[in-house]
Image (tube, rainbow, N blue to C red):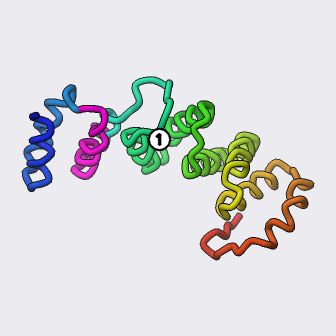
Amino acid sequence: MTVFKAICNFFAGDMTCIDVLAENEVYIHESIKYIVAQIYRNNGRREQALQLVRPIDGNIKSISSSLSYYLSLLREKKEDSLELLSILKVLRKNEIYDKEYLLCEGILYFERSEFEEAYAVMSISWERFPEDNHVFLNYLVALWKTRRYEQIRDLQENALARKIEPQYTMSF
């Protein structure tokens, strides 16, 4: 009850409740950890937020609200990219295919110049979400970076049939 009361009091404007939440973290139910983590993050306690929603082990079977918020926290800082990449890889290996997370993982591999890994991720994205222009363009880049020119030629008609908005264009 203390946790729920502290959350309610926080949203009513009582900032002292953040310390009450911190003192009672062991009682915070998994289903509301992301809410407390948001409170921490929005009040300058990013590390505490990360600790609260960090997955306990690498055996991730689904994307919970807490995991989703944890991933969004990791995306905020470049220095957290290795941890972000490792969790995204676990999701993919466990066949948890979320378009946003697959794109994020592929882009992280592009940034690290790990083009074969990027290609592997973008291939899954392309298989699962072929109608998405962002996926299509990232898949083309992966093909290009891994010198799969014949596959690019095979996609020419697909590319011409698409209405690609300027927001999806890329620069190299």
Instruction: Tell me the SS state at disc 1.
Output: helix
Q: Residue at x 51, y 40 (%)?
A: 84
Where in the figure is residue 158, as x and y percent of width and height? 81, 65
Where in the figure is residue 143, as x and y percent of width and height? 80, 52
Question: Which amino acid type corresponds to the residue marked 1 in the rendered image?
Answer: Asp
Q: Quadrant of the N terminus?
A: top left
Where in the figure is residue 141, as x and y percent of width and height? 75, 57
Q: Residue at x 65, y 61 (%)?
A: 132
Determine the image quadrant of residue 152: bottom right
Question: Magenta segment: does it hold 97?
Answer: no
Q: Residue at x 69, y 61 (%)?
A: 131
Where in the figure is residue 10, as x and y percent of width and height? 12, 49
Callout count: 1
Highlighted magenta segment, given as a residue range? 29-48
Secondary structure mostly seen in magenta is helix
Q: Report crowding for label 1: few under 14, some 14 to 19, many 20 or more residues within 10 A (C-alpha).
A: few
Horizontal relation, residue 9 to residue 25: left or right: left
Horizontal relation, residue 97 to residue 150: left or right: left
Q: Residue at x 76, y 41 (%)?
A: 116
The answer to whether residue 171 is above or below residue 18 is below
Q: Which residue is mark 1?
A: 80
Question: Magenta segment: does it hold 42?
Answer: yes
Q: Quadrant of the C terminus?
A: bottom right
